[in-house]
Amino acid sequence: MNSIVNEIKKLKEEKNAVILAHCYQNIEVDEVADYVGDSLYLSQKAAETDADIIVFAGVYFMVQTAKILNPDKKVLLPRMESGCLMADMVNLQQVREFKSKHPNIPTVCYINSTAEVKTECDICCTSSNALNIVKSLQAPQVLFLPDTYLGKWVESQLDGTEVITYPGYCPTHLRIKPEDIIEMKKKYPNAEVLAHPECHKEVVKLADYVGSTTGIMKHAIESDKKQFIISTEKGVVDRLKRDYPEKEFILIKDNIICPNMKWHTLEDIYNALAKEQHEINVDKDVAQKALKCIDRMLEVSKQCQKKA
Ligand code: 13P
Ligand code: SF4
């Protein structure tokens, strides 16, 4: 086995550390990760862990969420550059302005948002539970931020709830155009098209299945089809190809790569753990308020998973 992989595993044991990795990460990160998955799965794992140190190979908002759930643990981000362009599209003042334009309406924030923004929201969601979270509010109108496309996709799945969205978006997913899907469908007429709800609504309309990163993976694994056009970040395709060589997975186009997710290398993970560096901290008051919004999501998700 590769020596850096061995060194990281040794350090993990010595320091009682856990490594969480999002499935958009560079695939070699999986060799040392304890859990690999989507944002919901990783926040559930962060909430459950009894490790002393959490090394999070993901983007900043995911690591902040892990810290808020574990105020007494050391939470490390191997590369501090790993932000999320969508999360940076809304700040505290902007969420307040958005709410004041639409008063007395419950506010849902996508987990892709900062801790400060979460303090102003009633509940957060991820792409895999957004529909259940909005439904759980039983409100005729809901404010949703920052992702307008996820918010509008949720609205399209509901009977009568108006989802008023903030104009944020994911630049990586918006690179996928409806023409790309039409062209790929012509080229691979037997393939199923699987898309992330951060994609443009005209792309989502053309998909056979819409879901979170792990939703897409699960659907592809369970489907009787053999060929899939994947409309989300390349990391999903890399993992599907590695784990299911009997099926064919085609990335919708080559440049669907989130640069911020790709910062962390095995060396960065080793350095973070060895030097216990790049610790993420969240102001105590902010963390306490943001925790309510995150806890509420985890509770609703738990109830929905029990019923399923
Ligand atoms: P998931 O909720 O599917 O993990 O998505 C997170 C994300 O940032 C997608 O761009
Ligand atoms: Fe943020 Fe988009 Fe990257 Fe996801 S893919 S982390 S939403 S910039």
Image (tube, rainbow, N blue to C red):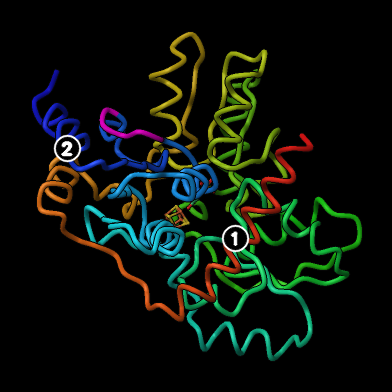
Q: Earlier in the sequence, mark 2 or mark 1?
A: 2
Q: Compared to 106, does 42 lie above or below?
A: above
- From this view, report whether residue 212 is shown above or below residue 32: below
* Image location of residue 24, percent across then percent down: 40, 42
Residue at position x 26%, y 56% from top?
A: 76
Based on the displayed image, in which of its 4 quarters is residue 308 positioned? Answer: top right
- Marks 2/1 in contact by CB < 8 Å: the verdict is no
Asked if residue 187 lies in the magenta stretch, the reply is: no
Q: Residues within 10 Å of mark 2 (few under 14, many from 20)?
A: few
Which residue is the site of mark 1? 295
Q: Main secondary structure of the magenta part?
A: loop
Magenta highlight on residue 34: yes
Residue picked out by circle 2: 14
Which of the 4 quarters of the picture holds residue 226? top right
Up the image or down, 165 lies above or below 4; here it is below
Label 1 lies in ligand 1 vicinity (Cβ under 8 Å): no
Q: Which residues are magenta?
A: 31-35
- Compare residues 11 and 109 and report the one nearer the observer: 11
Q: Is residue 145 left or right of residue 244?
A: right
Give coordinates of residue 136: x percent, y percent: 79, 58
Q: Residue at x 71, y 53 (%)?
A: 300
Q: Position of residue 63 (x, y in %)?
A: 37, 58
